[in-house]
Image (cartoon, rainbow, N blue to C red):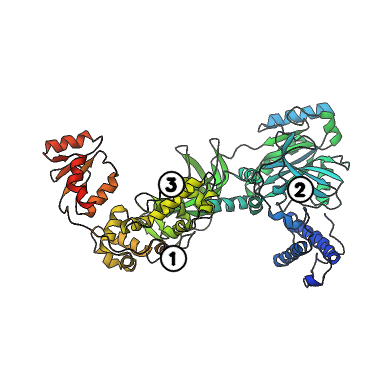
Amino acid sequence: MVDEPRDNPYIRDPDLDFKEIGDMSKEDAKEEVEDLREAIEHHDYLYYIKNDPVISDPVYDTLFNRLATLEREFGLVEENSPTQRVGGEPLDSFETREHVREMLSLDSSEDEEEVRRFDERVRREVGEVSYSIEPKFDGFSVEVVYLEGEFDRAITRGDGMSGDDVSKNVKTIRTVPLKLNKAPELLSVRGEIYMPKSGFHELNEERLKKGKEPFANPRNAAAGTIRQLDPNIVAERPLSIFFYDILDCSQEVKTQRETFELLKSIGLRVNDLNDLVNEIDDFIDYRNEIMKMRDELEYDIDGVVAKVNDIDKREEMGKTARHPRWAFAYKFPPKISETKVRKIIVQVGRTGKLTPVALLDPVDIKGVTVSRATLHNEEIVKKLGVTNGSKVKVERAGDVIPEIEEVVEKSEGEFSMPNSCPVCGSDVVEEGKYHFCTGGISCPAQLIGSLQHFCSKAAMDIEGVGEKVARKLVEEGLIETVADVYSLTKDDLVELEKFGEKSADNLLGQIEESRETDLASFIYALGIRHVGRERARLLAENFSLQELENAEKEELEQIEDLGPEVSASIYSFFRNENNIQTLNRLKDAVGEFERLKVGDEFEGVKMVFTGSVRGYTRDELKELMEDHGADVTSSVSNETDFLISGEKPGSTKLEKAEELDIEILSVDEFEKKFLNKIT
């Protein structure tokens, strides 16, 4: 047990009536800073390692903030102060450093006979032994070095001889002490960084809400986090560590049990499931008992380890090129199919559809680790009876998409879809078996898709904002609603990866031109559910933008092709407070709109296009002709008046037109007869 610091006023019932900064000398500040650092390190130990805090969170925060203030005001910041755990400047790359002593992997097997053969070999070579036994953590191995009790560096295992210096990242982990209590002058320890299961599921939940791919399992999440070049990202993620081996030490240690005792006494976190046995049968029994517990543990393990307890006998046995000959890992078989549902969350897709997703304890299915499964819709969840805490059988549908096949063991409660969007709080509407967020352009979960749609050619026609650019703009925080498109600057854009000055100028030019769009394109760009290009044009013909915003459901239903469901969707869109705010910003950027003026020059003319017409897409021609009264269809019939034949026309339409004796116009004839009259 780490000794409680003596004569430190900030350990128990700390006095928070601090002296005024202006009344303090630098010597006064230094003395208080030392007490605060010592106290905060001790409180971190009690909270994160012993799980036995003696002060409240607000009191801890007050002490921490006082320390940060004194360090800043008196220039007393030190590298290993508790205040330096919060991150720091991003790194360009990791430096490669050698280990104090090589970090070998373990020989392992799932076969009990292999374990017994290991024991026979050990006893044959060094006689009677006892084994120190412990869980085998499924995390990320690191060497942590302390010099004179202070954190010096942390290095990934790498190739066993050297690894990446990840000191800045590891220092952000609260269970890694920055100062040790009565530690040896030199101490190099091996530890396993892991992500607690609860933290893993919370992290994946956040990633899913943001439209990002979740991590496959806690080990990948921990490894990916430690390899981040930005320590601030590491500081935000839930990581912890267990220490379990001494690589080098200036103090003599004779057994593995003494190793654990020393580590605990100086404040390093040791797993409490370690034990000592004399017979290999006891180790095998231990493995079977721990395997039963694995699902209930807050950390992932994939087996147990037996190590010869006596250090001298270890030296006598030596090592191979890859692993020590005095240790063996008895692995668990992979978890197949059956696993536990940690939590059912609701993911909002780019179209606004709400989909229930089960976050699972990671399970191996046909060689692939699965940590989530889609539940499709509320009906399926209720039919299966899936709830938080259920034990379920999972399959990979078509060997690709993980799905829950059945509930093996039910848990209490029942799932139901939320009435409001879990991301933006907008109302949720039910359409058949599915639920949709009504937030539209204001919903962050739909933002990347909304931005792409808003900028598409048929909408605001802002060329260059595809999926990749849209994602970059959103992830960099430059776009929080589609209205932010009109606030982008050249400096914003050129700072984006692979976005040069020319690209920035081109995009800004496109944005500027989009301010001159027509009402139909603007309505379509809003991405209202059930309102495609044709319905947007219909709305623009019958309403100005202001009239549309204020239109009642009954008014909308009177328009041809706008039934109750579509009208309700339009009505809800313009009553959503978040949408109103975004819409007002858009109107400030592009102005108000009047009704679309529709000509009647070609009223009653029915035409079909085949092939391409120079300067126009098929959609643009259709829109242009219909805006002036023509009826453009996709197939030739007895009612067709003209077939316009462009470049590379389809033979079927030409043959049908000739068969029905329909007038066929070349591009030049079409321009003379129609286009020149309206352009």
Among the 4 quarters of the image, the one containing residue 93: top right
Amino acid type, residue under disc 3 in the picture: Gly
Amino acid type, residue under disc 1 in the picture: Gln
Report, in whole angstroms, how far the alpha carbon at label 1 lies from the one at label 2.
Answer: 54 Å
Q: Is residue 154 left or right of residue 407?
A: right
Q: Is residue 193 left or right of residue 567?
A: right
Q: Residue at x 62, y 52 (%)?
A: 199
List x then y, in percent, for residue 226: 66, 45
Reading the image, the residue beneath label 3 is 464
Q: Determine whether the residue tagged by mark 2 lies in a helix, strand or loop.
A: loop
**Residue 305 - label:** none
Q: Is residue 470 left or right of residue 679?
A: right
List x then y, in percent, for residue 234: 65, 50
Reading the image, the residue beneath label 1 is 581
- Indicate which disc, 3 or 1, sits on the residue closer to the N terminus: 3
Q: Nearer the viewer, mark 2 or mark 3?
A: 3
Q: Nearer the viewer, mark 3 or mark 1?
A: 3
Crowd tier of the residue under label 3, counting other residues whose Cα lies within 10 Å: few below 14, some 14–19, many 20 or above: some
Reading the image, the residue beneath label 2 is 270
- Indicate which disc, 1 or 2, sits on the residue closer to the N terminus: 2
Asked if one can make out residue 136 in the rendered structure from this viewpoint, the answer is: no
Asked if one can make out residue 68 in the rendered structure from this viewpoint, the answer is: yes
- Indicate which disc, 2 or 3, sits on the residue closer to the N terminus: 2
Report, in whole angstroms, how far the alpha carbon at label 2 lies from the one at label 3.
Answer: 54 Å
